[in-house]
Image (cartoon, rainbow, N blue to C red):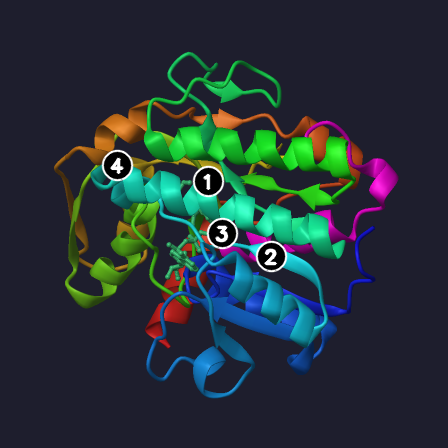
Amino acid sequence: MPETPGDAILVTGALGQIGTDLVEALRAKHGQDAVIASDVREVANHPFVEEGRFTRLSVLDGDAMDLVVEEEGVGTVYHLAAILSATGEKNPELCERVNVGGTITVLETARRHGLRVYSPSSIAVFGPDAPDRAPQVTPLNPTTTYGKTKVTGEVMAMNYWKQYGVDTRGIRYPGLVSWKSPPGGGTTDYAVEIFHAALNEGHYDCFVGSETRLPMMYMDDAIRATLELMDAPADSIGEARGGYNVSGISFTAGELAETISERVDGFTCDFKPDQRQVYADSWPDSVDDSVAREEWGWQAEYDLTRMADEMLDRLSS
Ligand code: NAD
Ligand code: SER
């Protein structure tokens, strides 16, 4: 039988793009001391490291994770540590080791200690055979190593729920656009870099073509989706618990550049596709999120213009 879990929340990979926003939101909701941020690295002058509770922790070290869970009275893990697609395709062995190995560590720790787990998936679970508007249930045949690790993560999460009753939940995040932290080596990073480049250089060389359309989401929507999913009653969570499709905004790189040029005088963008174009082309244009809407009431709030206005406003100030 698992031990009785505590109330504290452990966030792995907390210094990354999502963790930077999620830790702040969790601390606002549950209290400053309730949330332990962790990462394999430290970042000088980062507020989590300097001010809040922070511990250096690799998700490949099960003993260290056990110790943190026991000593800090952890009851829930938000497992964000991962290697993203662009970095992962350059180093597939590392991507498999961290993404699959790290998720096993978290799920095993959760099984032993009776923890709840949030473990995100990605639109990268889909492959070229998925419909342009990818449904919740469709064959998952990703061509990237990163995508394969995400499919494995979804399957493992479902198995731990079915076999051991571990309350695992996840979202297939679209490409996320945010201003607080730089993106961590993904294919969708252009949708963040373009805002910085527009304000700093007035020009961006975009690494995917102008017609490339992908599912995207503003970070505030992604954080709200995460908290709403974790707050949803257990009996509302069905077979999609390993990775719910959530839809935000679907736009082409050209439409994004056009939206920014309407707001930043003189901004220009050239499109110079590199290897990341291949990964982007293997993913769907948008996702059908009707299951998330029905089961836990998901509804996005940001469209392209609202997101662009907020990104430019936040980055300017
Ligand atoms: P990120 O790359 O910005 O951050 C990941 C963090 O994990 C980094 O701070 C890194 O130092 C840390 N890390 C790497 N190896 C580690 C290890 N062995 N132990 C502990 N920490 C380690 O990633 P993110 O964008 O914040 O993504 C978080 C999760 O969301 C990942 O599972 C990712 O696949 C998923 N996701 C992100 C996006 C997106 O657009 N950001 C989209 C879909 C899915
Ligand atoms: N934004 C992520 C990436 O591009 C998708 O999971 O890797």
Q: Earlier in the sequence, mark 4 or mark 1?
A: 4
The foreground one among 208 and 187 is: 187
Q: Which of the marked residues, 4 or 2, is nearer the chain's N terminus?
A: 2
Real-space Cα separation, disc 4 to disc 2, in angstroms: 24 Å
Mark 3 or mark 1, which is nearer the start of the sequence? 1
Residue 78 tag number: 2
Between 94 and 220, the residue placed more toward the observer is 94
- For label 4, the SS is helix
Q: Is residue 28 visible?
A: no
From mark 4 to mark 1, how far is it between C-alphas?
15 Å
Give the side of residue 244 with respect to residue 312, left or right. Answer: right
Q: Are marks 1 and 2 in contact (CB under 8 Å)?
A: no
Depth check, mark 1 against mark 3: the one in front is 1
Residue shown at 42% from the left, 26% from the top:
285
Sequence-earlier tag: 2 or 3? 2
Check disc 2: other Cα within 10 Å, few if <14, some if 14-19, many if 20+: many
Q: CA distance from mark 2 to mark 3?
A: 19 Å
Q: Position of residue 131 (x, y in %)?
A: 48, 14
Q: Which numbered disc, 4 or 3, marks the residue closer to the eye?
A: 4
Q: Secondary structure at mark 3?
A: strand
Report the side of 119 relative to 272 (left or right): right
Front residue of 162/89: it is 162
Is residue 222 one of those drawn in magenta?
A: yes
Q: Could you tell me residue 315's position as x and y percent?
A: 35, 69
Disc 4 designates what residue?
89
Which residue corresponds to mark 1? 100
